[in-house]
Image: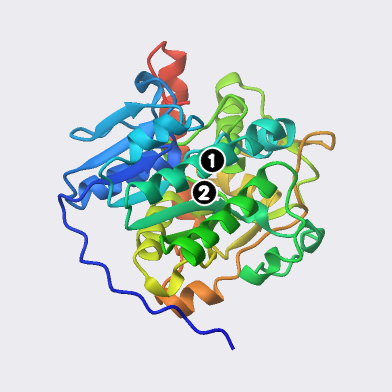
């Protein structure tokens, strides 16, 4: 029988301890930076490889650095003095991106490898890794009426090519840094995060943002049609961004979850057709649906089994999809018309 490691409790995180957030110029990283800033943390280092002018959110009072973390020396610089690290940097996007650019997705292993070693050398107390439901065995996701995926379903391993393999390998690396070197690592498998300040155009956007944009475009152009990737019967669950950042905080500070992958996602399962219907209802329109069966569609079905997170944290992501979608739609609509007017937008 395996015995649990005995370890000293960490001192309580102080408001002036340095928190490092990587991928902070992106959707989730930007929201997490704002979350900790709003909680009163005064020393936050935000890092992303994008030029600062292209960051989705810039939070006043935060040290913001433009660094490519696939380079080890940049990881060392980023981790200097950090007490906690939130590793969200990755080259990724929606299904269209991760199916077409597998090499770019797999190269993110460089970021995670260098970041783990740099964090360890810098004496970082806690290290969070943003994994993905793409790490799960795809053979369990061949039917839209899918059984919700529990954490043990990652093995035997057959994740999505490219992105999924990179995430699963990096999870194992995090677990070994705890087992062999005693660095406390935490691993959350994200399930389809959406919300304001996310990618909504350009090829990296995920389904909720893409559908919101397509509905807005159809109304604006007076062409009341929408093209849906696949047959519309694929099923997914979608987690609102506020639930995501709260969940990251709770997971990172729960010692029961050291080096233990856990689902972070909504268990509200919908078809892609259902998702379109919800956005149509928000927009007050009905569109003619056309289905592109040649487009990337991903697995047939995927849902989050939240038994474990409810057991350990007494909580699960709970923002209803209708509520989060309405906020997201209104934000994308504002961005769409700002861009049309020639103003700067987040894309």
**Residue 119 screen position, x and y as percent:** 39, 47
Crowd class of label 1 (few under 14; some 14 to 19; many from 20; radius 10 Å): few
Residue 265 visible, this angle: no
Q: Earlier in the sequence, mark 1 or mark 2?
A: 2
Q: Residue at x 55, y 71 (%)?
A: 306
Q: Nearer the viewer, residue 307 or 322?
A: 307
Mark 2, Cα crowd under 10 Å, few <14 / some 14-19 / many 20+, is many
Q: Which residue is mark 1?
A: 284
Q: Is residue 310 visible in this depiction of the protein?
A: yes
Classify residue 221 as left or right of residue 322: right
Residue that appears at 27% across and 52% down: 83
Q: Examine the image and state in which quarter residue 141 appears.
A: bottom right
| 57 sits to left or right of 217 | left
- Nearest to the observer: residue 271 or residue 42: 42
Q: Are marks 1 and 2 in contact (CB under 8 Å)?
A: no
Q: Is residue 289 left or right of residue 248?
A: right
Q: From the image, which quarter does the N terminus lie in?
A: bottom right
In the picture of the structure, the residue carrying the numbered disc 2 is 193
């Amino acid at each position: 029988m395996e015995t649990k490691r005995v370890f000293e409790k960490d001192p309580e995180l102080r408001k002036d301890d340095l928190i490092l957030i990587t991928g902070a110029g992106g959707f989730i990283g930007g929201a997490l930076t704002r979350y900790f800033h709003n909680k009163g943390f005064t020393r936050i280092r935000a890092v992303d490889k994008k030029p600062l002018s292209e960051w989705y959110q810039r939070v006043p009072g935060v040290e913001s650095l433009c660094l490519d973390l696939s380079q080890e020396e940049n990881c060392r610089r980023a981790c200097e003095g950090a007490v906690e690290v939130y590793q969200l940097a990755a080259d990724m996007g929606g299904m269209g991106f991760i199916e077409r650019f597998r090499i770019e997705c797999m190269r993110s292993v460089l970021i995670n490898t260098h970041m783990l070693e740099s964090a360890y050398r810098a004496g970082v107390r806690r290290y969070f890794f943003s994994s993905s439901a793409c790490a799960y065995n795809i053979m369990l996701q061949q039917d839209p009426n899918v059984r919700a995926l529990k954490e043990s379903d990652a093995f035997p391993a057959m994740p999505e090519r490219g992105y999924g393999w990179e995430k699963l390998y990096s999870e194992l690396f995090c677990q070994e840094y705890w087992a062999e070197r005693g660095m406390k690592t935490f691993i959350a498998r994200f399930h389809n995060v959406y919300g304001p300040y996310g990618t909504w155009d350009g090829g990296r956007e995920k389904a909720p943002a893409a559908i919101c944009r397509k509905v807005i475009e159809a109304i604006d152009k007076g062409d009341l049609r929408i093209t849906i990737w696949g047959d519309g019967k694929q099923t997914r669950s979608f987690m609102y961004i506020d639930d995501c950042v709260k969940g990251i905080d709770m997971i990172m500070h729960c010692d029961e979850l050291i080096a233990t992958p856990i689902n972070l996602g909504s268990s509200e399962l919908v078809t892609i057709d259902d998702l379109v219907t919800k956005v149509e209802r928000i927009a007050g329109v009905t569109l003619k649906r056309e289905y592109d069966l040649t487009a990337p569609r991903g697995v047939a079905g995927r849902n989050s089994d939240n038994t474990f997170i409810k057991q350990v944290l007494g909580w699960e992501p709970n923002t209803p999809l209708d509520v989060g979608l309405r906020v997201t739609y209104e934000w994308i609509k504002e961005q769409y018309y700002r861009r049309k007017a020639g103003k700067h937008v987040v894309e």
